[in-house]
Amino acid sequence: MFRASGATFQASQADRKSKKTKGAKVIKSELVQIVAARNPHLYHRDVENIVNAVLDEITDALAAGNRVELRGFGAFSVKNRPSRSGRNPRTGDSVFVEEKWVPFFKTGKELRERLNPGMNDRDDD
């Protein structure tokens, strides 16, 4: 379905958006294909290694409790959810939910502006 030309990729995205889903999803193999198509001078296996390295570094940093910031895109961090008393939705019984650490993503300014074009125009009034 994907070919090296951008037109084919855009058509496949349009096909996906027309389906009754909550939005198009890009999986890691598709991301590798997109990056490889935009950089024809790189081997596909090298692009795959680069994408894996970036995702592994983000994961390792979060696992160490660090924050990862990609300017214009957003910041990944880890938040603590303390233990609490929950409820089993099937039986209604009270259950104990242990403390856990969860990844958190906050969008960057440029990404927010691209998702909401024209929002800055209203701020100038």
Image: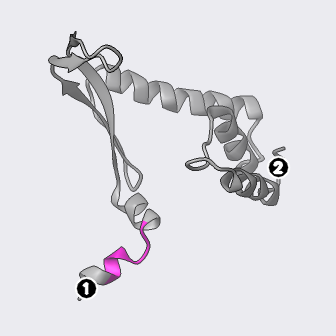
Range covered by the magenta-colored residues: 116-121
Figure quadrant of the C terminus: bottom left
Is residue 60 found left or right of 52 in the rendered image?
A: left
Which residue is at 32% across, 77% downward?
120
Q: Nearer the viewer, residue 67 or 114?
A: 114
The quarter holding residue 26 reads: top right
Which residue is at 15% across, 21% downward?
82
Q: Position of residue 89 (x, y in %)?
A: 32, 21
- Residue indicated by mark 2: 4
In the picture as drawn, the residue positioned furthest to the bottom comes out as 125
* Image coloring type: one colour
Which residue is at 21% across, 19% downward?
86
Q: Nearer the viewer, residue 38 or 19?
A: 19
Q: Position of residue 52 (x, y in %)?
A: 57, 27
Number of the label disc, if any, that sits on residue 75: none
- Residue indicated by mark 1: 124
Of the numbered discs 2 and 1, the one sitting upstream in the chain is 2
Is residue 75 found left or right of 96 in the rendered image?
A: right
Is residue 93 found left or right of 22 in the rendered image?
A: left
Q: Name the amino acid, label 1.
A: Asp
Q: Does residue 72 show up?
A: yes
Q: CA distance from mark 2 to mark 1?
A: 42 Å
Q: Secondary structure at mark 2?
A: loop
Which residue is at 84% across, 44% downward?
1
Q: Position of residue 100 (x, y in %)?
A: 25, 18
Few, some or many residues within 10 Å of mark 1 (<14, 14–19, 20+): few
Q: Name the amino acid, label 2.
A: Ala
Q: Secondary structure at mark 1?
A: loop
Q: Position of residue 80 (x, y in %)?
A: 20, 25
